[in-house]
Image (cartoon, rainbow, N blue to C red):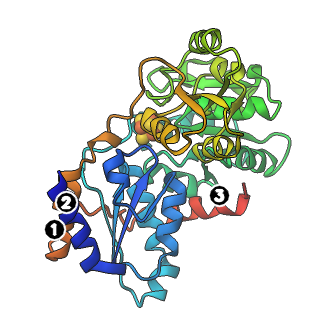
Amino acid sequence: MDNLHCEIDAIRQRLGQKLLILGHHYQREEIVAHTDMQGDSFQLSAAAAQNTNCETIIFCGVHFMAETADILANSPENLARRNGQRVDVLLPDLDAGCSMAEMATRQDVENCWNSLTTLFDAEEIVPVTYVNSTAELKAFCGQHGGLACTSTNARAVLSKALQKNSQKQRVLFFPDQHLGRNTALKMGIPESQMSLWNSIEPEFGGNSSEQIQNSRIILWNGYCCVHQKFVSGHIDEIRKLFPKIRVIVHPECRRDVVEKADESGSTAFILKQIAESPAGSQWAVGTESRFVERLARQNPDKTIVNLAFQPSYCETMGLIELPKLAAMLLSAESGLKRNIIRVDDSIAPDALRCLLRMLQAGS
Ligand code: SF4
């Protein structure tokens, strides 16, 4: 393993600023050690877009993140700045996908849209996609006046979408039902004004037409298997063991978990809250366990534990291993780049439009 670390360091030094290695917060520690920047998916893609020197990005994350980095880094504006020179975005393992992103396919979302537009004018529905989705769905939103959101700005995006034209406005939110529901509840929208769309049901996603007509938020039936593992009983158990502990969870968790926790928010929010808490604080954290374990190492003056006794790791993030990173660097240095993620030109402009609308919506 030591040899691999040395090899990676040497190649990084030789490639210098031509190479940018990005690592998601949920990556293995030995991978994070070799990254130029760590962050959540959108922070990393935005960094990729702003970097003017690099020719290659190795994205240590999952497939949809590399797609977003490709769309932003190779936007027409950035291409013009680099005289047409593309930045190649590489993913160390092509099997590193996201089960939640795969729960909403373009075809299923289009079928849903076609059903909804038998009840409403298309202008009355704004499609909103969590950035944890395929480029095809971002392009769908771009084509239909919609936008993307992150777990940080979901509330600002939903507010903007619901104000778009009139009181009649409604949102089709995909793929994560929990982020959509938890955000809408925080905005004061009752669950009675939401419906859950199950794409395998033949009629209106398993709802009556009246239910859909009374809904301001139509939620796709997707979820993150890592965050859905947390249940409210975990909070009861941890509070019995540590009566003074504060519970902080990600909004991809179920509604009852978010409501029972002391605080909820994005990965960036969790990181900040814990970093700024006084020495001696106790935290139970309901999110991906590699990130929680890193938080514990970075805050040795505090007690930081996983909310559940069984750790909850994102398996596909874990597919990025040191030998794969080393092999990718060796091939990139030799000029034989592998695993290039390139969003097709037929969808990239619409997907970019969807992401830019999100940035305009603020946070
Ligand atoms: S943690 Fe969940 S949403 Fe994030 S990549 Fe893994 S499966 Fe997808």
Compared with 29, 218 (above or below) is above
Q: Which residue is mark 1?
A: 330
User: x, y percentage for residue 45?
Assistant: 49, 62
Residue 329 is left or right of residue 289, and the answer is left
Look at mark 3 in the image and give the residue it sits on.
358
Q: For ligand 1, give the image quadrant.
A: top left
Q: CA distance from mark 3 to mark 1?
A: 37 Å
- For badge 1, the amino acid type reads Leu
Q: Which residue shows up at 45% across the image and 36% down it?
A: 293
Q: Residue at x 52, y 45 (%)?
A: 298
Disc 3, ligand 1: is the CB inside 8 Å? no
| Quarter of the picture holding the C terminus | bottom right
Q: Amino acid at mark 2?
A: Ala
Do the residues under discs 2 and 1 have CB atoms within 8 angstroms? yes
- Would you say 165 lies left or right of 141 here? right
* Amino acid at the residue labelled 3: Met
Name the secondary structure under disc 3. helix
- Residue at image mark 2: 326
Along the viewing direction, whichever of 125 and 269 lies nearer the viewer: 269
x%, y% of residue 22? 40, 61
